[in-house]
Amino acid sequence: MKPVRVLFVCLGNICRSPLAEGVLRALAEQKGLAPALEVDSAGTGAWHIGDPPDSRSIKVALRHGIDISALSGRQVRLEDFRDFDLLLGMDENNVRTLKRQAPEGTAEKVHLFLRYASGLGQDVPDPYYDGPEAFEALYQMLEAGCSSLLERFGDRAS
Ligand code: 4NP
């Protein structure tokens, strides 16, 4: 079967989406599902192109055994709507921006991450201006969402 190609999208591509990318990749490896999945992340904004993830996201990932320090920020590009099966926005704002940019016939690939993964119409809030405790909460939210996402893919494959 062809791998499912997932692009996580947030505003800056330094806090939420690179952490989601690391978490999904790690969970997929643990569950032996890595070959069934291609995962990447991007931001709707251009401020952090080429930057590593925020140090607080790197730290919380490391505490959970995941190294995201080598990831590099990039902005969403038009080809992403062709190259990925799913573009999962962390919040409704990201989803609105993506739907506005989506070339004809591709808007149905864009979803709110937690709605698609778990049926929850809930944002993954932007933690950029919050303290380090917000990053542990972010990690927990992303881990739960990514587990549900993998279960959904598993159901699709069976
Ligand atoms: P992210 O968080 O969207 O989760 O990466 C942010 C990072 C940077 C900015 C905003 C949100 N910024 O305005 O630079």
Image: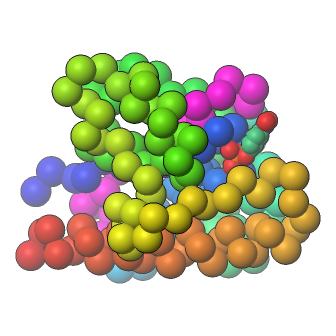
Image coords of residue 64 (percent x, y): 68, 78
Quadrant of residue 146 within the rendered picture = bottom left
Seen in the picture, residue 76 relative to 12 is either above or below; the reply is above
Seen in the picture, residue 130 relative to 31 is either above or below; the reply is above
Asked which colour scheme the image uses, the reply is rainbow
Quadrant showing the C terminus = bottom left
In this view, the residue in front, 87 or 60, is 87
Q: Which residue lies most toward the right here?
A: 131
Q: Magenta stretch containing residue 154, yes or no?
A: no
Image coords of residue 140 (percent x, y): 63, 77
Instruction: Find the magenta span and give its range.
Output: 32-50
Image coords of residue 123 (percent x, y): 57, 59
Count of numbered circles on the image: 0
Q: Is residue 54 in view?
A: yes
Residue at image point 54% right, 74% down: 143
Quadrant of residue 57 within the rendered picture = bottom right
Assign ligand 1 to one image quadrant: top right
Quadrant of residue 121 within the rendered picture = bottom left
Q: Magenta stretch containing residue 40, yes or no?
A: yes
In this view, the residue in front, 80 or 67, is 80
Quadrant showing the N terminus = bottom left
Left/right placement of residue 93 relative to residue 65 reads left
Residue at image point 30% right, 20% down: 103
Residue at image point 67% right, 59% down: 125
Q: Is residue 72 in view?
A: no
Left/right placement of residue 85 relative to residue 56 reads left
In this view, the residue in front, 53 or 116, is 116
Residue at image point 37% right, 49% down: 111
